[in-house]
Amino acid sequence: MDSEAAAQEIVIITGLSGAGRSTAAKSLEDMDWFVADNLPAGLLPTMAELARRASGAVPRLAAVVDIRSRAFSTDLRSAIGELRARGMRPYVVFLEASDETLVRRFDSVSRPHPLQEAGRVVDGIAAERELLQPMRAEADLVLDTSVLNVHELRARMRDAFATEAENALKVSVVSFGYKYGLPVDADMVADCRFLPNPHWVPELAPLTGRDRPVIDYVLGQPGAADFLDAFGRAVQIALAGYDKSGRHYVLLAVGCTGGKHRSVAMADALAERLSSAWPGIQVTHRDLGRE
C-alpha cells in the first residue's frame, strides 16, 4: 500500500451492482479492517466519528455504499465533504464492469438488478451507470472487474491496501497421522509412508520425529532426500502461483501412519528448506502425543 493510501482513515467502496463490491469488502475484512456493508451514505460521518472515539480500537475503517435512492450521489458526495471537513481523508474505490459481464453475473444468480424495475437487467445497469457517473469521476481508485475473477480482485485490493506484512503469503506446514484423518483444509499433501517406520525399531519407538535419533533415521533412508527435493520444488512452484493469485494462507500437510515419527521429521525438514523463501513459516504437529 502506498503512503497516500496508508494515510486514509476510511475507505468507501461503491460502484455498479454486480461489479464485486462484496468481494472487495471481504478482502479488506481478511486484512482486519472493520467493514460496514450497505451503509446509507448519510451515516458515514457518524460511523467514522464513532470509530475515532474508540481510541484506536478500530484503526482501519471501510464501508460499502450502494444505490438506495435517486439522491445516492448527492448523499455520498455530501458525506465525503463532511468527512473532509472533520479532518478525515476518505478514499473512494469504484468498481465497474462491462454490460455483458454484469448481465452474465446477474443471470448466473437469477437475481434482478436493483434498478431494473419492470424492465430488463440491461435497463437497470444503464440507469445505475448514469446515476453513478459523477461519483466515478471523483473516485480515487477505479477497478474494472470485467476480466477479473474473485481471487484476482482480492489481489488488486491487497496490492492497494495491505501492509507489507499482510501482503505476504502465510505458509504453514502440519504433520498428521492418516489413521486420524487428513487435514480437511490442506492445500497440498505429502505421504511419507513409503519410508521405513521407526515404530518397528525398539530404541526409536518411544521417541518422536523431533528427537535427533529419529530425525537421523528418517532423513537417512534411501529416497528421503530425493523426496524432499522433489516435493520442495513442487511446493515452491505452487506457492509462487498462490502468492500471485492473491491467496493469504496455504497449508502444506505431511502424513505418515500415526503422525509421530516420519511425518514430524519430514515436516520440520520441509519447513526448514522453505524458510529462506517464505520467512515466518509455521509448523504444527497435529497428532503428536495422541498415541
Image: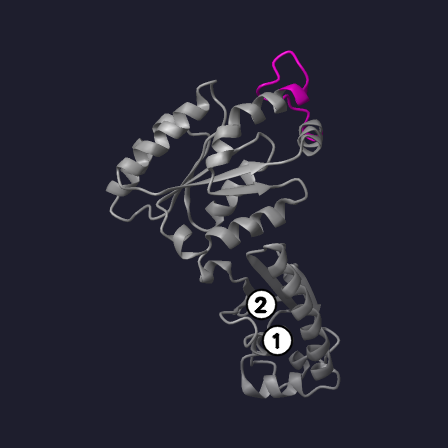
Residue 283, placed above or below residue 112: below
Depth check: 202 or 207 in front?
207
Q: Which residue corresponds to mark 1?
A: 270
Q: Position of residue 242 (x, y in %)?
A: 63, 59
Residue name at image x 24 percent, y 41 percent? 53
Badge 2 marks a residue whose secondary structure is: strand
Residue name at image x 62 percent, y 45 percent? 150
Q: Which residues are magenta?
A: 108-123
Magenta span includes 220: no
Give the quarter of the image for residue 209: bottom right
Residue name at image x 71 percent, y 82 percent? 224
Mark 2 burial class by Cα count in 10 Å: few <14, some 14-19, many 20+: many
Which of disc 1 and disc 2 is earlier in sequence? Answer: 2
2 and 1 marks in contact (CB < 8 Å): yes
Residue 186: in sight, yes or no? no
Three-letter amino acid code of the residue under disc 2: Val
Residue 252: which disc? Answer: none
Count every numbered label the image shows and give the total. Answer: 2
Q: Which residue corresponds to mark 2?
A: 173
Badge 1 marks a residue whose secondary structure is: helix
Give the quarter of the image for residue 266: bottom right
